[in-house]
Image (spheres, rainbow, N blue to C red):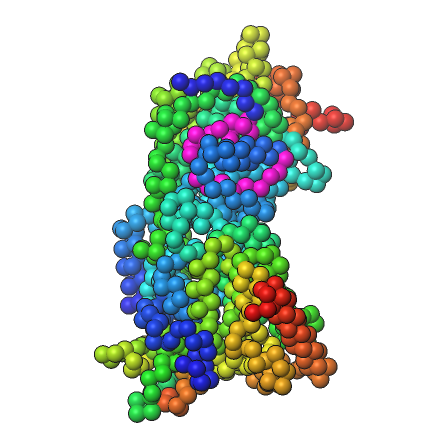
Amino acid sequence: MLKQLSWLILLLEVVELSYILPVSKPSEGASGFTGIWRSFKPVIDVGKCRKCLLCWLYCPEAAIKRVGDDYMSVEVDYRYCKGCGICANECPFKAIIMVKEG
Amino acid sequence: MAKTEILTGNYAVAYAAKLSRVQVISAYPITPQTSIVEKLDEFVESGELNAKYVRVESEHSAMAACIGAAATGARAFTATSSHGLMYMSELVWWAGLGKFPLVMAVVCRALAPPWSIWSEHNDVLAHRDSGWIIFFAEDNQEVLDLTIQSYRICEDERVLQPVMVALDAFILSHTSMPVSIPEQSDIDEYLPIPGSRRKPFILDPDDPLTHGNLTYPEYFMEIRYEIEKSMNSARRVIIEAGRRYGEITGRYYDSLVEDYRCGDADIVLVNVGSSCGDAKEAVDLLRDEGYKVGLLKLRTVRPFPFEDLRRICSGKRYIGVFDRNYSFGYGGILHCEVSSALSGIKVPIQGFIGGLGGRDITLDDYVWVFKILVDMADRGVEPKPPIWVGLRGVV
Amino acid sequence: MGGFKGGGLNMSISIRSLTLNEYLLPGNASCPGCPASIGLRMLGKALEGRYVLVIPACCSTIIEGPYPKSSYGVPVLNIAFAASPSAAAGIKAGFEVLGKGDIHVVVWAGDGGTADIGMASLSGAAERNDDIIYICYDNEAYMNTGIQRSSATPYAAWTTTTITGKSEHKKNLPMIMAAHRIPYVATASVAYPLDFVVKVRKAASIRGMKYIHLHSPCPTGWRFPSDKTVEVGRLAVQTGLWPLYEIDHGVFKLSDICKPLLDKRNRKPIEEYIKIQGRFSRISKEQLAELERYVESLWNEIALMIEKSKMSEGGC
């Protein structure tokens, strides 16, 4: 499925650029759904979260999204979260715990 | 009105770059290319040429800067020679394989050790596989004309490959000859507007793309094949550019080769570069004596002129190939390529090696070469291993 | 955001003021906990997309992900290992000639491409004062090819080519760049991202060559758990091993976070930094003592530079 998608993207690029060039377009998931890499996943305790946004700041993957009307709440994008655990380690309020994946 | 000036080959390159309104120049000095970069600096600092001159600290950086400039769509230029070309080799390949349209003048000089500053073609020919279009100039007029045409060729949407113009060290680079310099307005019409190029890609934050990232085997060959397609199109584009150039200047370059009296010749010598001038004189001399000989000058080594070669050489009694280079353990590089191009055509091919390290190839040498070919044709002997012309102490 | 143990103690910007746009897209090929990813994200937040990246061979080449997709949301020119500063100079020259001189040209290179194979090119760009921002993200080894030592690998560190620990000290790149008298040199750390963002923005406001050396603790190569990247980076600063400073038009400015560290009693013991990292697990007592001497001399030099800067600035 992913391979067919890649060929479709290649075809679109060929059509758009009219050449096959060593040129790639920006895309989420360039290495696939990297969420499948993890062994532990971060779970945010919304009650303890004080909206300091440090987890959003530090996440190497940009897998923590700012959501809500004021964009001050945070949510994990589990499709891409690699489970590194930096968010849990840095949260000053211990609002994130790393839970073993089932 | 075009005006004629007495110019060295290096100055011809500099004037051509100025006429082409190059926008980014990035070069490192090396004998015998130095007067190119010096003349260009003069043009830039006096305001005659509106270009950015990046005075890089090595040839490797020179090509890197040209690649960077070409990636923005600007018209880039560099020049080098011999070891400079070898030092920038990694990036010469990068430019060819990555499809960065730019032009480089290479003053062909021997490689070391031992140090030599004189003419030899190994430096340029070592890069014949890299996706660059390669021209060899015979005289300073060709140097100027080919450098200008190179911009039209490389920026053509059907090509988009970098172009190298090779001129022989000292024989062309430092020898003064009359050169007709076209009008700036004619060249402005001949070439696209500098910096207007958007193909094959440009760096633009409004339309981001990544050039050159990791590519798995599934996709790699198609990307390479694209370069082959460009090279094939280049054959047509070079001829069109040469024809259009002739319409403006009266000097037509509408062929990948120059056929000098090959039509009814029995013997044809294939050659490149400045010593073709002497070879043509030898042809004239021998024709006066009744020998039916001709010179086939290859203007481009890449794309290789297969069709012209096969058309002109078939039916000849003997073909000679003169190499001002050597591939140790094999033979002359052009001899190898010509032999392969003519495979299937029944004509014997004899290789000659001469002029290495800038040793003079005289009129007498060429007469000697042609007479050997005539003799071999008359006696019906098979081709021998390459004959080194003018080698002392060898029978 | 002062008072928290992270987030950068530079008061001029807040976390919430940073743009929501991401210029490093998720789903890229970086290792979990990769500091280069943090750095790239912060670079994007600092310049908000109005830049092009020049990337030589390094981890970030691979983080891009494979053709035909890319994880970078800005134009990227990948270039050969030793060529990034000159390629950037060429791009800037091209942009200026085409009237697009407002687009920043940023080199994002590892320590290998900066301190070793790219050193000549880097020095050339600095001497010419090319108008580029050069950011070296320093993970202290050739990580992309499998953790071999570079000249930026610290003393006593294990790498695959210094199995018993490196016997030379780390090449002091920021000082080498300062000796070229470029208008802006700074050190930064992924553990203090807001400080890094401020430094990038400062660099972007200056014409000429700007050099930022970003400390990037690598879990894979330094052998620590992936959740400790920021913690290790913070300890590097707190032990005094990675001083944060700027050399702004020749004037040495120690970053506020580091001012207390001038007094060695405020510097945490090096063991705290060393013991988390597997690459220092075999460190001997002599090597540790040598590292302590190194930190000592580093801070003596810093004190001297502060004095010199006070004198040249008229004691402010």
- Give how far across and how far down residue C188 sits, in percent: 51, 71
> Which range is magenta?
B9-31
Rendered residue at 59%/47% (across/down) = B57
Above or below B202: residue B105: above
- Give how far across and how far down residue C90 sits, in percent: 47, 48
Residue B255 can be seen in this image: yes
Res B235 quadrant in image: top left
- Quadrant where the C terminus of chain C sits is bottom right
Above or below C289: residue B338: above
Q: Which of B188/B365 is in front?
A: B188
Q: Which of B274/B53 is in front?
A: B53
Q: In this view, which residue lies farthest toward the front?
A: C314
- Any magenta on residue B16? yes
Res C21 quadrant in image: bottom left
Q: Which of B346/B351 is in front?
A: B351
| Image-based side of A79 in relation to B379, left or right | left
Rendered residue at 61%/19% (across/down) = B366
Above or below B101: residue C268: below
